[in-house]
Amino acid sequence: QKVSVEVLDHLEHLALVDFRDWEGVERLQKAIQFADQLHEVNTDGVEPMDSVLEDRWCLYLREDDVTEGNCTKELLENAREKVEEYFVAPPGNIPLPKLEERETFLQGS
Amino acid sequence: AALKAVLRSQVSAALKEGRVTPTELCQRCLALIKSTKFLNAYITVAEDTALKQAEESEERYKRGQPLGILDGIPVAVKDNFNTAGIETTCASNMLKGYISPYNATVVQKLLDHGAVLLGKTNLDEFAMGSGSTDGVFGPVRNPWSYSKQYKEKSVPKSHSEDEESNWVITGGSSGGSAAAVSSFTCFAALGSDTGGSTRNPAAHCGVVGLKPTYGLISRHGLIPLVNSMDVPGILTRCVDDAAVLLGSLAGHDPKDSTTIQDDFKPFELPNLTDVSKLSIGIPKEYHALGLSSEILALWSKAADLFKNAGAKVVEVSLPHTCYSIVCYHVLCTAEVASNMARFDGLEYGHRSDMKDSTESMYAATRREGFNDVVRGRILSGNYFLLKQNYEKYFVKAQKVRRLIANDFVKVFRSGVDVLLTPTTLSDAAPYTEFIQEDNRTRSAQDDILTQAANMAGLPAISVPTALSERGLPVGLQFIGRSFQEKQLLTVAKWFEKQVQFPVIQLEEVKRHESGVFQHQKSASFS
């Protein structure tokens, strides 16, 4: 069962990573095929396991006290675009172009 | 011989007695790194800071106040650990030029113990891979490719074929660290282990690779791949050294809430002489498809070794082993999809010039920054996490994970102390052969013997066992009970003593020998 173009497009939007070409899509197809083997296993009555430490420890919350910080300068060092103490991003709220509107190999399939 | 000796008892003693100084040691290692540059084991060599650290160590020795046995000992760290002031790239374009503003907890601990940080080692991009071939700085070459032992056994097909085309991979993804330790440029190195990434290259490079129990060593500062499986790994030339490193690194870290709260007491390994009370389990499912007959024979021989020494050796079953790779595949890609979301170009790392919108900038940045392997895993992970797939794949895999972990619980509950398995399916492949298959296929094949220990969070160690017919190292793996590293390492140390794995004979290292030390057989600093 092949993955539909809609889903491929949806994945590119979610992941903000592109398949680049049909080879990339093939890779996904193979990955899904591989993962399908999981359905051979009988997991009736089995609880999903989040962490191997589930018995040993409960994820704890610490006190809401500030223990470190004041490192604005260091943290800004690695950002390429900044203004004063802000990271600068291009305008938001502009969705990526829809499939029909952009140049992608996924078109015409 | 100074570097080859590398016995903690020798080097540490020598440092203490002033027979060698930390700066001399550091300089020799740096020189050796330069002359073994062709291995491509290091991405960054922190020469200036290392020498400074060595000088500070020397001062402490002069005052008779060394910080401990690690004081002055040169170490290397895989390039997916944050190191303050030093570039941390994860062998990816995404982080080229990224200078960490902080030290990972394990790095800080090493420095607090006086270790000298020589540099950052090469890996597969973002630790995804089993060959250390898929990073932007190129592949790492296995030092054994240049060993007398390998050269003697390789028959050149023609006059023109030379070392250049014959070299073998280190395995991965911590190949740089393994190569660094194997070629004597450092005494210990940090790797990471999510599916076998420390044990696999350890086996291929003839060094000890320890994967500690999940939750024992802090992951703070280790750029995450799979939060529920990642652990920092330890690579050394002998088991005693691994115990020393473990002692300095383990313990609760308030900055990593997945570290257990129990007190950790560093330990020295006893010299086990009586193994009659030991029960060794041989999981039959680890006789995997593709396991070389050579390694099968060595595994069998090792089991006999224990039997003849009086230990109880039993065949056991871990029935869900065959599903561990598939299970890992789903859980890993899902967690990766989440973990890689932080790379958007805004706060650090590569940023695309695209300015049209936030989303298009993110997309372009990630397009430019990640290689095919990384992008492939992100996309697969996102697929498995889609609403319509979540139960079918992700939750299903989590259930299978419990079954795999339970397999181990049952076996250990039945009285088995330690499991003995092969680490890899074969000895190291030539690079030209390795790259014929794609990364995912390779990882799926190569991880089969190491992966389940990560699923179950158990400690595991690969110990160099013997040379293959091609003259390359083969390691065997011991898997222990949760948090029972002392028992695991004690057994590993006994085994190490029995097999007497040969020292690598490298031209480059010979040239750097001086008459300071007597030639020694073992190669540790402990």
Image (cartoon, rainbow, N blue to C red):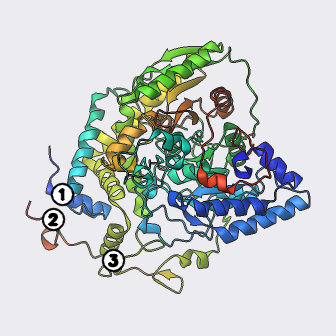
Between residue A74 and residue B108, name the one nearer to us: B108
Amino acid type, mark 2 = Phe
Labels 2 and 3: the sequence-earlier one: 3
- Residue matched to label 2: A105
Work out whether residue B106 can be spotted. no
Amino acid type, mark 1 = Trp
- Residue matched to label 3: A92
At 29% from the left and 40% from the top, the residue drawn is A35
Please tell me whether mark 2 sits on a helix, a strand or a loop. Answer: loop
Amino acid type, mark 3 = Gly
- Measure the alpha-carbon separation of dots 2 and 1: 8 Å
At 27% from the left and 34% from the top, the residue drawn is A37
Q: Quadrant of residue B327?
A: top left
Please tell me whether mark 3 sits on a helix, a strand or a loop. Answer: loop
Q: Quadrant of residue B325?
A: top left
Where's residue B333, x and y in %? 37, 49
On screen, residue A69 above or below B458:
below
Query: How many residues crowd around disc 1 within 10 Å: few (fewer than 14), some, or many (20 or more)?
Result: few
Where's residue B264, x and y in %? 72, 41
Labels 1 and 3: the sequence-earlier one: 1
Q: Are marks 2 and 3 in contact (CB under 8 Å)?
A: no
Please tell me whether mark 1 sits on a helix, a strand or a loop. Answer: helix
Between residue B33 and residue B224, name the one nearer to us: B33
Taking B453 as reference, is A38 left or right? left
Number of disc labels: 3
Labels 2 and 1: the sequence-earlier one: 1
Between residue B320 and residue B512, name the one nearer to us: B512
Taking B197 as reference, is B332 left or right? left
